[in-house]
Image (tube, rainbow, N blue to C red):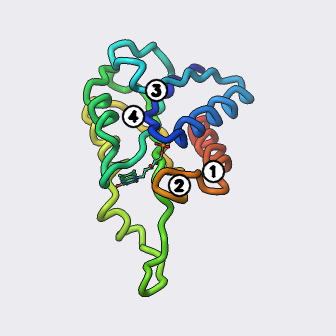
Amino acid sequence: MKIEYFHASVYGNGAMVAEEFKKQMAAKGVMVDVHHIEKMKPEEMQSADLYVFSSPGRFGKPIKEMRRFLKEVDLPSGTKYAILTTEPAPKPDKKTGKMPTEEEIGAIQHVISIMNELLKEKGLLKVAETKVYVTGLKGPLEASWQDKVQAFVIAILG
Ligand SMILES: Cc1cc2nc3c(=O)[nH]c(=O)nc-3n(C[C@H](O)[C@H](O)[C@H](O)COP(=O)(O)O)c2cc1C
């Protein structure tokens, strides 16, 4: 199995996640080629069994460079993909101390849903999606981030 992994990390957190993913997949005998989307055009994408797209969020959406990249992706219908986003960890409301519900987060965060829309309209098939949290706007990654990567690897390999 061969995986091509495209990320749009700005502050390095998504890049660390990509390297961890590559390491964990290598331990299972799966080869992963990691690319920053700045360094490769969508038309230069190599053939693979699965493509991973990873983006940081900006103002509720995937960062614009990733939106542009996904719009230009030209892969055969039925190609498998997985999505990973790095997003700020939910925090309790300052007044009530309550954590936001999934619904409240979903009302402002559309990072994963926009990535899925762009790929599904090309006929691509999603096999897994996950969020890895950062504890501040620019990082660092949450304490258990390697476990999230492990769960993502397992979800992909089935
Ligand atoms: C100006 C600014 C706006 C941001 N807005 C969002 C957002 O709307 N949604 C989100 O999930 N993350 C947002 N973030 C946090 C990014 O998700 C975070 O910087 C990123 O996950 C870090 O990954 P990277 O180190 O790979 O770039 C924002 C960060 C900055 C600096």
- Figure check: 155 above or below 97: above
Placement of the N terminus among the 4 image quadrants = top right
Q: Are marks 1 and 2 in contact (CB under 8 Å)?
A: yes
Q: Amino acid at mark 2?
A: Tyr
- Figure check: 108 above or below 9: below
Q: Is residue 19 left or right of residue 37?
A: right
The numbered disc on residue 68 is none
Sooner in the amino-acid sequence: mark 1 or mark 4: 4
Spatial separation of the CA atoms under disc 3 and disc 4: 22 Å
Q: Residue sitting at 31 percent across and 31 percent down?
A: 70
Q: Residue sitting at 61 percent across and 49 percent down?
A: 148
Q: Nearer the viewer, mark 3 or mark 4?
A: 3
- Figure check: 117 above or below 45: below
Q: Residue sitting at 50 percent across and 48 percent down?
A: 130
Spatial separation of the CA atoms under disc 2 and disc 4: 24 Å
The one of 113 and 59 positioned closer to us in this rendering: 59
Sooner in the amino-acid sequence: mark 3 or mark 2: 3
Q: Amino acid at mark 4?
A: Leu
Q: Which residue matches tag 2?
A: 133
Does dot 3 land on a helix, a strand or a loop? Answer: strand
Q: Amino acid at mark 3?
A: His
Q: Which residue matches tag 3?
A: 36
The numbered disc on residue 145 is 1
Spatial separation of the CA atoms under disc 1 and disc 4: 25 Å
Spatial separation of the CA atoms under disc 1 and disc 2: 7 Å
Q: Which residue matches tag 4?
A: 125
The one of 119 and 70 positioned closer to us in this rendering: 70
Spatial separation of the CA atoms under disc 3 and disc 2: 19 Å
